[in-house]
Amino acid sequence: MSAMDNALSEAAIGSQILLSRIEVQGVLRRRLLDLGFVPGNVVEVVQRSPLGDPTAFRVNNTMIALRKEESSLIFGEPVGGDAR
Amino acid sequence: MTYTLALAGNPNTGKSTLFNTLTGMRQHTGNWAGKTVVRAEGEFTRSGTSYRIIDLPGTYSLYSNSADEEVARDYIIFEQPDVTIVVIDATSLERNLNLALQVLEMTNRVVVCVNLMDEAKKLGIRIDLDKMKKRLGVPVVAISARNKTGIDALFTQVELVASGALVPQPVKIPYNEDIERKIEELEPYILETLGTRYPTRWIALRLLDGDESLLQSLKANMDALPGTSQSSKEVIPHGHTVCH
């Protein structure tokens, strides 16, 4: 929606991101939607692996790790203070 | 008369615990035809009614086209169990209801079974079962599969739905105008090709989604049984004409 949104892959550890767009396509898009990567939902960036990829996200009370390939195609804005 | 039940739900919701509680030792396991997905089924009798129950693979969805999800989807659509029991985890309702709503688009013969209520209580989660029942339009029952509580209440509802004494009216999920218009356009063609044996609106949605895997299953199923077990529903109109 807004031009201010950033890719999930760029979000700071510990920040809460209000999702705005999911640009992943195909079967994987469906999978991500099913797991809770839905516009309007808030995900928490939990931790990044030592080599920088993948990153763990908490969504709907469940931890899910995504690689940059996917997380760079999911966009949102930080909520609850200026986490970035 | 034996009713057929299917158990659906996310992984780790206590589905298999419920299955084992119900069937005890009377269960067989094998694989689904042509798939390396475990198939568990069993038989039991409750209050004089006998049931056959299938434990579907635990999945988050029925649309991602993994082998597990295809098995679960095809069973509900093609085998049309008398009741599908959707087991949901009280501690993670949002994700669990995603699957429940998918099942409600496929069939109205559903009883939703909320498990792990005690865990939810510990986390301070309060669940309004009456409200869920009203919003979903199907019976909603709380159980604890581990402590074997709530099973009688569950089967009161299962029996009502199986026997047809209760015909649930599940919530119809509205889509945006564009999609609704296209569903309307497709429905007559689907009815003409498939008749009323499958949920027309759901098939229309799958077609709009470009779901190739469903189309393949549909074709395979129609080739395999040109009106055998499914034909009972088509017999009814003939019966009516004879009466006149």
Image (cartoon, grey):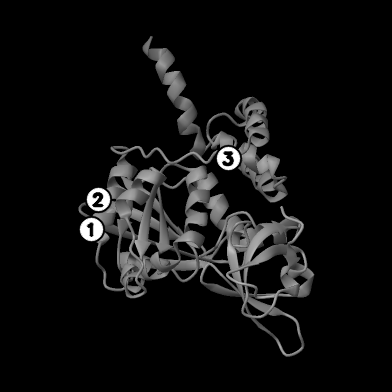
Q: Position of residue B181 (x, y in %)?
A: 65, 29
Residue closest to the eye, B228 or A67: A67
Q: Identify the subunit bearing mark 2.
A: B
Q: Position of residue B145 (x, y in %)?
A: 32, 69
Q: Residue furthest top?
A: B244
Identify the mark nearer the N-term, 3 or 2. 2
**Circles 3 and 2 on the same subunit:** yes
Residue B66 visible to an observer of this rendering: no
Residue B123 found in image quarter: bottom left
Residue tagged by mark 2?
B156
Q: Is residue B22 left or right of residue A64?
A: left
Residue tagged by mark 1?
B152
Query: Looking at the image, do the residues carrying marks 2 and 1 touch, with CB atoms under 8 Å apart?
Result: yes
Name which residue type carries label 1: Asp
- Residue lying at 49% horizontally and 50% vertically, measured from the top left: B101
Separation of marks 3 and 2 at Cα, in angstroms: 28 Å
Query: Looking at the image, do the residues carrying marks 1 and 3 touch, with CB atoms under 8 Å apart?
Result: no
Which numbered marker is on residue B202? 3
Q: Pick the quarter of the image with the N terminus of chain B.
A: top left
Residue B220 found in image quarter: top right
